Image (tube, rainbow, N blue to C red):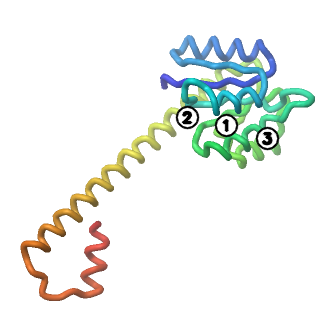
Amino acid sequence: MNAHILIADDQPEIRDTLGESLVAEGRSVHACGTGREALSYLTDGERPVDLVILDLDYGPGEPDGLEILRDIRKKNETIPVIILTGKGTVETAVTALRYGATDFIEKDFYIEDRLELSLEKLERVLSVLNENERLKAEVEDLGREVRFYRDEVGKRYQVIGESRQMDAILTQAT
């Protein structure tokens, strides 16, 4: 996954550690210190973002990661968002997932490993979604072909009669 990843965390050491790890794996990274900066980058950034990694707590006076997640979902329902926290609870994790987070990871000594596992899982999901989109496009193309040939057949051969049953069959075929 040669993705462009947005990291928003108020701890520079977390931003740097994750950023360096992701860049070493061939991904590009943009890091910022607040959720507001992340929202601004998503809106005005010079490059589309493939994944957002949000901190849960940005400190006093800043909206938390769940608020930022809700704002992201208002603008983009499909972008994957991973929430990081140093003090998570099961209730908070459930809330984050309900709001549309792709994953919820605790900050600890294994954060890089957990993030890598999350990214691997995400790659598999995105692969299935891409295949699904490809198949939908193929079905649409085939539907257009069926309609075209049905029209051509209708022009060459006169249909003696029409019925609801035949219309239903033709509708199912397209």
Side (left or right) of 173 relative to 117 = left
Foreground: 83 or 163?
A: 163
Residue at 32% from the left image edge and 55% from the top image edge:
139
Report x, y in % for residue 153.
12, 70
> Relative to 101, is 35 above or below?
above
Residue that numbered label 3 is attached to = 67
Foreground disc of the pair 3, 2? 3
Q: Identify the mark nearer the N-term, 2 or 1.
A: 1
Q: Amino acid at mark 2?
A: Leu
Foreground: 121 or 136?
A: 136
Q: Identify the mark nearer the N-term, 3 or 2.
A: 3
Side (left or right) of 42 relative to 27 = right
Report x, y in % for residue 63.
84, 35
State the image quarter where residue 117 is shown: top right
Disc 2 vs disc 1: Cβ atoms closer than 8 Å?
Answer: yes
SS assignment at label 1? strand
Q: Amino acid at mark 1?
A: Asp
Residue at 40% from the left image edge and 43% from the top image edge:
131
> Relative to 34, is 168 above or below?
below
